[in-house]
Amino acid sequence: MKPHKVLHILDVDKEAFYFNNLCDFTPRSEVEFSFITLAPAGEFTKSIEKRGLRVYGLDARSKRQILSTVTKIWKILKIEKPDIVHAHLFYPSVLGLALARLRKIKTVLTRHHSDALHLLPNKIKRSFYLTIENFHNHSADHIVAPSRMVKKCLVEWENVPEEKVSLIPYGQTSERFEAVTEDIIRRKRIELGMSGHISLVCVSRLFDRKGHKYLFDAVAPLIKNGLNAKLYLVGEGEYRKKLEYIASNLGILQNIEFLGWREDALAIMAAADIVVHPSLEDALSQSLIESLMLQRPIIATDISGAADTLDGGKYGQLVPPADSNSFRIALKEVIENLDAAQEKAKLGREYLLEYMDAKHVAAKYLNIYKKVLAN
């Protein structure tokens, strides 16, 4: 019996361990994966090719290229002849689900955002995007929600039948975290000057919905009252100048290191005293998962998948989003009880390795593919 052919359509340029693990733990005798990314060829395409799988880097992110992009995807569908198109992210799903439907191909959608569209302030824009989202929900034969909050959005807010939605987190393995040795951590702390003060690390795109402003507001009074701390921001984005302005006005610019995008983000997180995650929207934050896998104390906003990752706050501190005062109180408490926070994080790693075990996650996807093709 030939393996089922599943074509993923997405927009990723950096290596993505979610897809790596899915490929590595799904039996090739059962499923043959191939990939289309709207991004140009790069780290992601290399990581997939290294696994002996076909991947197409279209370099077609601009909406102005929509006609040529549609043509390219249509041709690839004719070449690959997939049994299932598995779509990810908003724009690739718009194209992938529509074209698969025209070719009468079964579809699976992984919903990588949670309530972001419902929170858009512009009513016309919100209505437009939710109309497209409704098309996605009805077009897909099955939908995967990576967190409980995403499933809630789909079932309770968008009226998707519950039997059409499966809760499956991003699969994790321990190997890449175990590669971050104590020696690597020690050298990273020396390189970044992380000793002699509390080192706070935030890994996130510099974007207004990632909540950096509220983090700055939380930290500033503590620093003014004598807390010796430095905040290391890993990530890049158009919001950097705005954040520098905010930090300067609060008098804490000298306490912030803008590190930009870093290949050594895992080592930087591992070197942190505390990982802070003030985001206002996520589906299932990869940086939170990575931080807990590295056994670092965490303070995060209680949004979407954060509660899944930290098991409702059992393995880290959860605070309301956009609430600087609550974040400040939590930060003060964790600093004063750092040993206890570290113990919670160690237990959290064990929890994640069970809840997000890559082999189990791949098996759940395989069951969905079989179920979709059987209907």
Image (cartoon, helix red, strand yellow):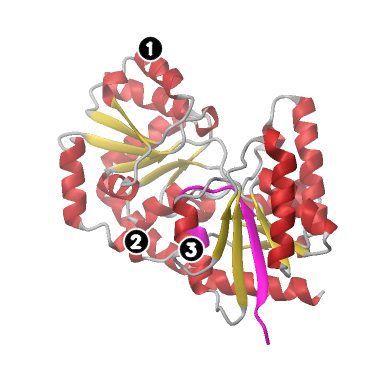
Q: Is residue 311 visible?
A: no
Label tally: 3
Give neighbour class at mark 2: few <14, some 14-19, many 20+ (Cα, 10 Å).
few
Q: Residue furthest top?
A: 249
Nearest the eye: 210 or 273: 210
Q: Which mark is residue 249?
A: 1
Residue at x 61% of width, y 55% of height: 36
Nearest the eye: 42 or 364: 42
Q: x%, y% of residue 374?
A: 79, 77
Give neighbour class at mark 3: few <14, some 14-19, many 20+ (Cα, 10 Å).
some
The secondary structure type at the circle numbered 3 is: helix
Residue type at the position of mark 2: Arg
Residue at x 71% of width, y 36% of height: 118
Residue at x 19% of width, y 33% of height: 197
Say if the magenta span includes residue 13.
Answer: yes
Residue type at the position of mark 3: Glu
Residue at x 79% of width, y 42% of height: 132
Marks 1 and 2, the one that precedes in the sequence:
2
Q: x%, y% of residue 34?
A: 60, 65
How many angstroms separate mark 1 from mark 2 (CA)? 39 Å
Marks 3 and 2 close (CB-CB < 8 Å): no
- Residue tagged by mark 3? 49
Say if the magenta span includes residue 331.
Answer: no
Q: Residue furthest bottom?
A: 1
Marks 3 and 1 close (CB-CB < 8 Å): no
Considering only vertical position in the picture, is 104 above or below 304? below
The secondary structure type at the circle numbered 2 is: helix
- Residue tagged by mark 2? 176
Q: Which residue range is magenta in the image?
A: 1-19
How many angstroms separate mark 3 from mark 2 (CA)? 19 Å
Q: Quadrant of residue 128?
A: top right
